[in-house]
Image (spheres, grey):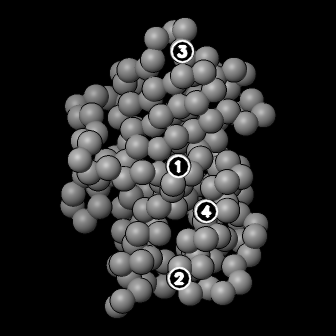
Amino acid sequence: MKLLPLVLLLSLTLFACGGDDDPAEPAATGTPAAEATQAPEEDAGGGDAGGEEEVREMFADYTKALGDRDWDEACDNLAPETTEKLQSNIKQLGVANPPSECTELMDQLYDTIDKDPTAKKTIDDITKSAKVDKVTITGDSASISWSATVNGQKTPVTQSARVIDGDWKLIDVN
């Protein structure tokens, strides 16, 4: 199916919120989630949003929401510009007039994904295997290095988050 590669790419992009896949930069290995490092304390601000544990918790909530197909919770963890990127990505699937609301966009994308057993398995595998390897916080911005297993291969992803109204939100970096 010609649509499968595009759905797969959009699925990983959605999961990574537009994160920058960089296979040339391997993810940290052998670092248990609770022992991952963080920037020095003076850089670990995050304002009212807290530090590394809050970023990890937000990422875990987002991952769980995707797996549960809970679009309200998933969208609650995304920055507004990520919704705009998601809308653009759905246009690539051939949808001429995609909705503007995050929950409706998620529903439309996952409706397409769930109709294709291979795409559904891939996104479900990503959701189940996503693991944060490292969080680096500088002020109100964070870099999250995480990996997931895609088609039996560990795929590293680095993406950003920022504080919005006192909470960490995943942002689109492309």
Tag 1 residue: 173
Quarter of the rendering occupied by the N terminus: bottom left
Q: Is residue 64 above or below residue 134?
A: below
Q: Which mark is residue 85?
A: 4
How far apart are the two marked residues, 3 and 4, measured between alpha carbons? 29 Å
Mark 3 closeness class: few <14, some 14–19, many ≥20 residues within 10 Å: some
**Residue at 57 percent of width and 38 percent of height:** 161
Q: Which mark is residue 93?
A: 2
Percent x, y of residue 107: 64, 73
Label 1 element class? loop
Quick check: 11 above or below 141? below
Q: CA distance from mark 2 to mark 1?
A: 21 Å
Q: Residues within 10 Å of mark 4 (few under 14, many from 20)?
A: some
Three-letter code, disc 3: Asp
Q: Which mark is residue 43?
A: 3
Residue under the image location 71 percent in, 65 percent down: 103
The answer to which of marks 1 and 4 sits earlier in the sequence is 4
In the rendered structure, are the residues bearing label 3 and label 4 in contact, judged by CB atoms less than 8 Å apart?
no
* Residue 151 visible: yes
Across and down, in percent, residue 49 comes to 68, 26
* Mark 3 / mark 4, whichever is N-terminal: 3
The amino acid type, in three-letter code, at marker 1 is Val
Q: Quadrant of residue 84?
A: bottom right
Amino acid type assigned to the residue bearing label 4 in the image: Lys
Say whether marks 4 and 2 touch (CB < 8 Å).
Answer: no
| Residue at 53%, 49% in the rendered image | 173
Q: Helix, strand or loop at disc 3?
A: helix
Q: Amino acid at mark 2?
A: Leu
